[in-house]
Amino acid sequence: MPVPVKTQNLPPIKKLRNIPKEEMYVPGHRTCAGCGPALQYRLVAKAAGPNSILIGPTGCMYVANASYLCTPYRVPWIHTQITNGGAVASGIEAAYQVRIRKGSWEGELPNVIVMAGDGGTSDIGLQAMSALMYRGHDVLFVCYDNESYANTGIQTSPTTPYGANTTFTPPGKAVPEGKKLFPKDVPQLVIGGHPAVKYVATASVAYPLDLMNKVRKALNYKGPTFLHIHAPCPKGWKFDESKTIEVARLAIQTGMWSLYEWENGEYKYQHRPSKYKPVRTYLETQRRFAHLQEEHIAKMQAFVDARIKAPGVPVSVPLPGPREA
Amino acid sequence: MAKELTLSGCAAAAQAVKMARVDVICSYPIRPYTAAMMELAKMVNEGELDAEFIHGEGEHAQLSVVYGASAAGARVFTGSAGVGVTYAFENYSPISGGRLPVQMMIADRALDPPGDFGSEHTDAMSARDQGWIMGWAETPQEAFDNHLINYRIGEDARVMLPQFVCQDGYFVSHIPGKVKIPDQAQVDEFLPPYRPGRHVLDPKQPCSHGPQIRPDQGAIMDLQRAQAFLDLPPVIEEVIDAYNRIMGRSYSPWLEEFMTDDAEIVFFLMGAHTATARHAVRHLRERGVKAGLVKLRFVRPWPSEQVARSLAKFKAVGVIETSTSYGGSMRGGNLLAEVRASIYDAPKRPLTTSFMAGLGGDVIPLQEFYWMAGKLLAAVKAGRVEKAVYWAGLEHEDAPAAGARSDGAPVAVAVH
């Protein structure tokens, strides 16, 4: 059995002005203006600090970041296939466990952090992510969720919302709403089936302190942890690149995204609105939803109403699946 | 103390991996390689080997785990067979391109369909162009030795390449043979601990592994990997010399010849069937046929010059193929294509043909070797070969159409 060698205790950041100045994810990359995933990358890396190793499955944060001879990572970083971020991270963590034990490397066990997109987490990368959680490696798995396969040209993923227009779900005469399926609930996949996991949280680029403190809390745990980060994509969701934070905040205000922590079986909410705005106000900010008709918006509202009651409560989809329609 | 044990190929591989003091192992079960991992699991759980033993969620994960562990500076081991080898395929090029000295055991198994446990080299051979060192063992002893030899070759700072260490499923993996086990001190002398260079994931010296390149940056990187293989032969020779000296063995690095001094016809092959071929050669000699055999130890790097030099001595060469390539230039013969390419520029070239044999994991009986020898003798007499490939056991006058083999047993023909 691995001997725990992690003793670190990253302190919470109380105020914005106490955020470390040192950048671990530096400028010079090629992400789009207003990129939500790039912003969360900067915050995660900053919160984790220099004793970290980042694992980058194929996705936007590989393709638009990791250009040969000018990558933006100030800590060790390794590309993995989109399939296997969880497995490669398992190997890295195991290597450090054994190297520290045998004395071929000296120091504190590094923070091993997977930075996977929604496809690399919940779709083609699901098997490797689940196995990492099952085996109990000391790894933080971050899913930066821009709700699509974005770098390949905005195709639907399992976290793309119902009704979104993507290049694989274009609205048409026969399928007016575009995407007919409701998304996977990724944190619940992790919580529901992996007893080794003690900490799972959601975060948003609109709440940077909350995000960074969740990263630190996750890294202070010995064992696997999971962070699901809402990261709006101006190009894919079709909104002005100056509105990333506004769109992200509106997602929380309408219940399209919830901020919560699941720690040793207990849920805690953060920034929960006392009164939710109608989903319509969120949909209106993004042209990926411009084609939706009243009945579609009503279905979306019903889905959100059910989901915001409490995290972890199964939500039945108010729609027939595409094969039954 | 050095000792002699009776071990299967799987158990021999596990012994070698243990003595290599491997750091990270990743397992997934598939016959016939599984027993190697069962042995290692026992060694780790009994406290005889200090290593992380990770249960991969599939072969793709196995190769992914050891990719990460090797990049983080660990000596690693994994293994597979058959469709497991092909399921992991995505990872082979990133590992060799990352110049990570990962070691993977393959105990060959036929690919589907139909489901077949038998040994056939097609699984491993389908990955021969992925930038890995690759070679076969004939016996559990050779398997044991090859695992240690390959770690030192792959981890040499001038090389830094992954290795497929192959043995035939069942014929080697499951049939026990005598294996001389050296002292741990001898192994430690031969194989020092793996010390990764600057090229490692380490927060004390950050670097990025595997970034994206532009198309115009691709050729130079491919050239570097190609150059690594061009630079490999002297390192392999040096390492095998050292192994022979420290362990008291007598391996030749590239080709092993048997009864070739005055031979006119030879079998050219690798792996387990060499054992039967030796018997066939002895019996043919008793009947006055000047037969011999040449055994190949490495498929990658392919020893072109040594093959050309060796085969120039003979009149006809029968290449025994235990894998196939549908629609290939040699009508299926993977090794024949390599052999003919090797001798193309040679001043003296033997006649060459190939025999599909042992596919699906069938044994190659002595009768089939005699039949092949007959075809080679006929080619010598005629001064030319009839065709590039024969399907041994299926082309006897009384065999293929009649649905019978040389021993009269019926051939199972499934028409889908």
Image: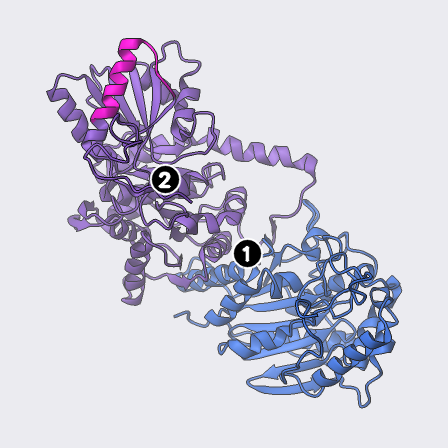
Chain colours: A blue, B purple
In front: A200, or A50?
Answer: A200
Please state the horizontal and vertical placement of residue B110, each as a whole percent of the image.
37, 45
Q: Which mark is residue B202?
A: 1
* Magenta residue check for B380: yes
What type is the residue that disc 1 sits on?
Asp
* Chain part drawn in magenta: B370-387
Secondary structure under badge 1?
A: loop
Whether residue B120 sits left or right of residue A256 in the image: it is left
Residue at 47%, 56% (x, y): give it: B69
Please state the horizontal and vertical placement of residue A202, each as a whole percent of the image.
67, 76
Q: Is residue A4 above or below residue B319?
A: below
Whether residue B193 sits left or right of residue B409 in the image: it is right
Q: Does any portion of residue A8 appear in the rendered image? A: yes
- Which one is closest to the eye, mark 1 or mark 2? 2
Secondary structure under badge 2?
A: loop
Please state the horizontal and vertical placement of residue A240, each as a whole percent of the image.
89, 63
Task: Say if mark 1 contacts mark 2, CB within 8 Å.
Answer: no
Residue at 32%, 9% (x, y): give it: B383
Q: Which mark is residue B323?
A: none
What residue does disc 2 label? B121
What type is the residue that disc 2 sits on?
His
Q: Residues within 10 Å of mark 2 (few under 14, many from 20)?
A: many
Please state the horizontal and vertical placement of residue B5, each as a whole percent of the image.
16, 50
Q: Does any portion of residue A197 appear in the rendered image? A: no
Q: Residue furthest left?
A: B286
Query: Chain for mark 1?
Result: B
* Magenta residue check for B305: no
Query: Chain for mark 2?
Result: B
Question: Do circles 1 and 2 both sit on a common chain?
Answer: yes
